[in-house]
Image (tube, rainbow, N blue to C red):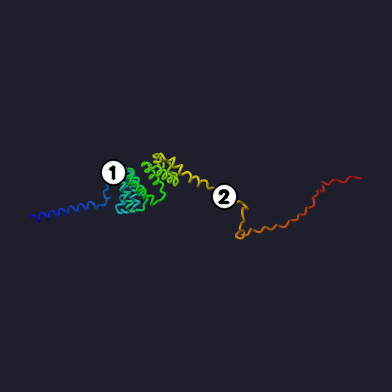
Amino acid sequence: MKRTLAVTAALLFAAGCSLYKSQHSQNPYDHPFYAKYLNPTVSSLDQQIQRDVDYLRTNPKSATVHNDLGQLLSVKGFPKDAETEFERAVNADGHFYPGWYNLGLARESRGDYTGARIAFDRTLHYKPGHSAALFQMGLMEESRGNFDSAIDLYARAISINHSMLDVKINPRVLDSKLIDLALVRAYPNEHARASMLFQGTPAGYGTRNTAAEPPAPSRQAAPEKIVTPAPPVTDPSRQTPAPKP
């Protein structure tokens, strides 16, 4: 009896393990959570999401499609699923800096500033001079009270990309109270570059190496033409008669 019970328990345990394994080895794009909220026949956004899901079902290592799907899901209103896609993007390609930047934004939006800083650091590691990542790092430094570091980051971002000052392109420029100081710090370099008006060499200045120059074309004077004046033409009908003696 005890042996029968032991065998039965072992079989049940094996069946449970098999079921668990089959459930957890399922393709995550077969039935994603957000699929029931999609209506591809009506919404163009849902069509794009479905397109990426179908592609990733058979090509799960595409960093660019993971990144694209993450952006679409964020617009659709699924921030957690969007963050998951950005993580999958950088897992598929660790050098994919757009995925790192988007992952930083997703983490920052939910208050994970440590995770966001790591993601923005990786962005700048693979793409030095990424102005948007520099600006985001500046915002985090300003929120922590590290004003000098924040000003430096803002100044670098503005120097690289002036559109960081455009509210339409970078709405978060309104979240900083240090932009005027960043402009002052960035101004000297900008002014120096703008004032570089190069000058040419004045005519006749210094000694020129004429031997290295091509010979000037010969300019011999043309022979002077001698023009013989033509005799005057007289009209007999207009001759003045000689005076009578």
| The N terminus lies in quadrant | bottom left
- Disc 1 to disc 2: CB gap under 8 Å: no
Q: Which of marks 1 and 2 is nearer the N terminus?
A: 1
Using residue 213 as the reference point, say whether residue 111 is left or right of it.
Answer: left
Residue furthest to the bottom in view is: 211
Give me the residue at 72% from left, 57% from top: 223
Residue furthest to the left in view is: 1
Residue 174 location, x and y as percent? 40, 39
Which of the two discs, 1 and 2, sits closer to the camera?
A: 2
- Marks 1 and 2, how far apart at CA: 66 Å
| The C terminus lies in quadrant | top right
Q: Which element type, helix, strand or loop, lies under badge 2?
A: loop
Is residue 215 visible to the viewer in this orientation of the structure? yes
Viewer-closest of 126 and 243: 126
Is residue 42 visible to the viewer in this orientation of the structure? no
| Residue topped by disc 2 | 199
Q: Which element type, helix, strand or loop, lies under badge 1?
A: helix
Residue 108 location, x and y as percent? 34, 44
| 10 Å crowding of disc 1: few (<14), some (14-19), many (20+) | few
Residue 130 location, x and y as percent? 41, 48
| Residue topped by disc 1 | 37
Give me the residue at 61% from left, 54% from top: 206
Residue type pointed to by label 1: Tyr
Viewer-closest of 68 and 216: 216
Residue type pointed to by label 2: Gln
